[in-house]
Amino acid sequence: MSGVVIHDLRFETGPAARRQSIIRVDALSLAPGQMVSLSGNSGSGKSTLLYLLSGLLVPTSGSVVWGGTDLTKLGEAGRDRWRRGNAGFVFQGFHLIEELSPLDNVLAPVWFGHLRTAKWRKRAQELLDRFGVPQDRGRAGLLSRGEQQRVALARALIFDPAVIFADEPTASLDAESARKVARALSDLARTENRLVIAASHDEEMHRLADRRIAISRGRLSEGIPA
Ligand SMILES: Nc1ncnc2c1ncn2[C@@H]1O[C@H](COP(=O)(O)OP(=O)(O)OP(=O)(O)O)[C@@H](O)[C@H]1O
């Protein structure tokens, strides 16, 4: 995976007479091995850009090319396939199945993909160990919020994705847990050559980022976040 190259990306909403530009990026490329943070006020377009980059949203025009694959040329099934093979997701609200154990949460993508659990169990355990998640407390809902987000990180990594999309990954955590998650994301980029793209309001995330992109009303600028 050689990162992403974007050209003339536009995302607009509303009827023709009242067209509203939500995202407008003339050119941008993001290389692997980096954590890229997206900052900006609420409603500036951070999540929309993540969705466009991951093919969850289709732009009005423009291209999003990942290592030669233009997501905008693929249908929904093709984009799903690309995500399964290449992308992991981390969200502010964890999106765990609280009734299941941490291990079963990490294995959930394996079940949804109709793959053999036995083959993935060891990797799931190793990922939980790596992030220091206790596995002796029953269901995931009983873990602290920081631990829950680390389970979500382990789950995002189960298929060894080249890119991780994180939407406000530290927003609902206390300062210490937030620092741990921010450092883990930065490590995943720098030491494992993944591309981490994180929308965040958290200064620590921006401080640890290799590239900082500020968004204001859907337009990007690089450097010190707003
Ligand atoms: N499909 C859509 N139709 C209409 N408006 C949309 C659509 N998608 C996004 N928007 C608008 O685009 C703007 C950007 O939203 P987005 O969620 O990307 O902002 P954000 O920077 O992630 O905000 P926050 O920090 O609050 O999560 C908002 O005004 C939102 O209402």
Image (cartoon, rainbow, N blue to C red):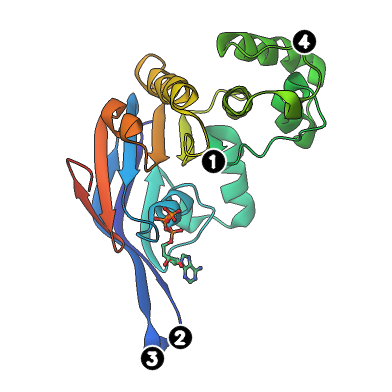
Q: Whole-percent x and y of residue 201?
A: 37, 43
Q: Are marks 2 and 3 in contact (CB under 8 Å)?
A: yes
Q: Which residue is mark 1?
A: 92
Indicate yes or no: mark 4 CB to ligand 1 under 8 Å. no
Regarding mark 4 in the picture, which secondary structure is present there?
A: loop
The mark nearer the N terminus, 3 or 1, is 3
Q: Nearer the viewer, mark 1 or mark 2?
A: 1
Q: Quadrant of the N terminus?
A: top left
In the image, residue 46 sits, relative to residue 15, either above or below, namely above
Left or right, residue 87 beside residue 11:
right
The mark nearer the N terminus, 1 or 2, is 2
Res. 61 in view: yes
The mark nearer the N terminus, 2 or 4, is 2
Instruction: Point out the residue furthest to the left here.
Output: 223
Res. 67 in view: no
Q: Which residue is mark 3?
A: 17
**Residue in the foreground of this view, choosing between 39 and 196:** 39
Q: Amino acid at mark 2?
A: Pro
Q: CA distance from mark 1 to mark 2?
A: 31 Å
Alpha-carbon neighbours of circle 3 within 10 Å: few (<14), some, or many (≥20)? Answer: few
Q: Which residue is mark 4?
A: 136
Q: CA distance from mark 2 to mark 4?
A: 54 Å
**Residue in the foreground of this view, choosing between 131 and 79:** 131
